[in-house]
Amino acid sequence: MKYKITLALGLLFLVSCGKDQQNTPQKTSKETKVETTKKKNKPEVKTVVVDANGVANVTITSNDGMRFDVRKINVSSGQKVRVTLTHTGKLDKRIMGHNVVFLKNGVKPSAFAVKAAAARDNDYIPEETTEVIAHTKMIGGGETTIIEFIAPEAGTYNYICSFPGHYAMMKGKLIVE
C-alpha cells in the first residue's frame, strides 16, 4: 500500500514538473513573434514615382521610433528629385526631430553626425558645410517638409537624419544611375 501511495505521489510530482516546462516554450514563442513583427516593419526599397515633368517623387515617413520607411532610393543623374518627409510621431522636434540629409560622395555619416550634433542652432546642419547635396528642415511629430534638388553624377550616396544620435538607425542610400 505504501508503495502505491509513493508511486502516486511520484507521478503527481513528475506531472506537476512537466507543467512548468510547458510554460517555458510559451514565453519563447512570444519572443519569437515579437522578432517576426520587427522584421515585418523593416524599411524597404520605395518605388520612385516619376511625374509628367520627369521629376522623381519619393515620400519618406519617419516616426518616434527613429525609423525611416525607405532604405534605398533609385534615380537618374541630372534628374530633378522631390523628397517629401513626413514625421508620423507625436513628439516635438526639440525632443525627437527628424530631417533627411543627402551627403556628398565620400562623406562618412558618423563624422558628419559629430559635426551636426554641435550645430543645434542651425537644425543640426553645420554652417557653411560643403558635405551636403541637399537637406530638409528639421520637423517634429505631425509635420511634413518637402525639398527638391538635382541628382548628382552616378554613384551611391548616403542619407541620414542629423538629429543627435539618430544617424545610426535613420539612414539609407541614394543610388544615382
Image (cartoon, grey):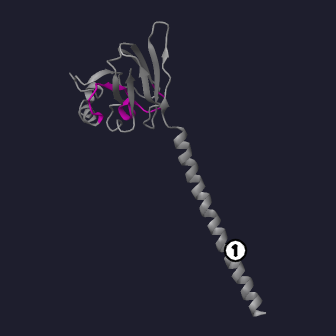
Residue, x 25% and y 25% (percent of image)? 131
Residue, x 41% and y 28% (percent of image)? 140
In the displayed structure image, the side of residue 129 where residue 163 appears, left or right: right
Q: Quadrant of residue 95?
A: top left
Vertical placement of residue 54 versus 146, above or below: above
Does dot 1 land on a helix, a strand or a loop?
helix
In the displayed structure image, the side of residue 83 where residue 47 appears, left or right: right
Report the magenta residues as a range: 86-109
Residue, x 67% and y 78% (percent of image)? 13
Vertical placement of residue 54 versus 45, above or below: above
The residue closer to the viewer here, 138 or 106, is 106
Residue, x 24% and y 29% (percent of image)? 119
Disc tally is: 1
According to the image, label 1 marks what residue?
A: 15
What percent of the width, then of the height, locates residue 64? Answer: 45, 35
Q: Quadrant of residue 148?
A: top left
What percent of the width, then of the height, locates residue 114? Answer: 25, 36
What percent of the width, then of the height, locates residue 146? Answer: 41, 17
The residue closer to the viewer here, 102 or 66, is 102
Residue 154 inside the magenta-drawn segment: no
Q: Where, quadrant-wise, is the C terminus in this rendering?
A: top left
What percent of the width, then of the height, locates residue 47? Answer: 50, 23
In the displayed structure image, the side of residue 110 where residue 47 appears, left or right: right
- Amino acid type, mark 1: Val
Q: Quadrant of residue 122?
A: top left
